[in-house]
Image (cartoon, grey):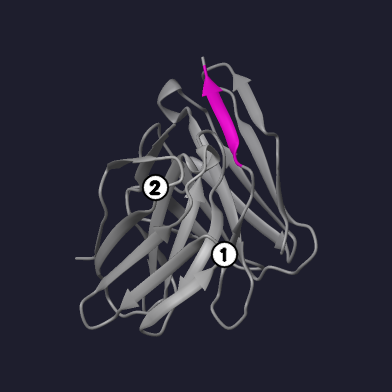
Amino acid sequence: GQNIDQPTEMTATEGAIVQINCTYQTSGFNGLFWYQQHAGEAPTFLSYNVLDGLEEKGRFSSFLSRSKGYSYLLLKELQMKDSASYLCAVMDSNYQLIWGAGTKLIIKP
Amino acid sequence: GAVVSQHPSWVICKSGTSVKIECRSLDFQATTMFWYRQFPKQSLMLMATSNEGSKATYEQGVEKDKFLINHASLTLSTLTVTSAHPEDSSFYICSARVLADYNEQFFGPGTRLTVL
């Protein structure tokens, strides 16, 4: 079966750095997405990785290792507004998105 | 980026009534739209994939006669929850796919459905 694993909840301090991990087992691979979702709102796109390595975009970076079935989202200089759920999703061979359950990130002052 | 709208944003209805939710891609043509459902503190659950001009493909366990999907144009898809019951209360989100290098999906703002 297809499976996406990520931690349920993480806590970090304002101004610090946090890394959210995601491991996956899917039927084929056409890229990995990270989305941010605030409570009561729809997800918003953060990043896309299809090749191994690190993609940096401002305070957010995303890493992918296809051989290990592993990705992480790195958030630097955390701000209170970064409190949200972070969803990892993999596009399989049928171009369907397989979603993780999401990681709720709590930022404390 | 591409913009997807949903209407209504929230709806409260009585048990047994039907509710229609619209999903529109505002500044691009979406050949494929997706309908998701999300219960509190849970991840997105794909309900169906909607391709313009053809019948929707429903995920296992989703009743196609209860959740009617119409994708009449490249910019509009509708989801109708027929004979809604309290257990259908959920957050319904649509997304539209842009055929690009990485097939990103753009999400609508979601519709909060409460069935009394």
Residue farthest to the front, as pictured: A15
| Identity of the residue drawn at 66% across and 68% down | B53
Residue closest to the eye, A12 or A85: A12
* Mark 1 element type: loop
Q: Which residues are magenta?
A: B110-115
Residue closest to the eye, A4 or B95: A4
Q: Is residue A56 above or below residue B5?
A: below
Tag on residue B65?
none
Q: Amino acid at mark 2?
A: Val
Residue closest to the eye, B80 or B21: B21
Nearest to viewer (mark 2 / mark 1): 1
Task: Please indicate, yes or no, whether residue B56 appears anywhere in the rendered image.
Answer: no
Main SS of the magenta part reads strand
Please give the chain letter of the residue carrying mark 1.
Answer: A
Q: Which residue is mark 1?
A: A58
* Mark 2 element type: loop
Q: Which residue is mark 2?
A: B62
Residue closest to the eye, A21 or B24: A21
Task: Please indicate, yes or no, whether residue B79 appears anywhere in the rendered image.
Answer: yes
- For marks 2 and 1, give the CA distance: 40 Å
Give the percent coordinates (x, y) of residue B107: 60, 54
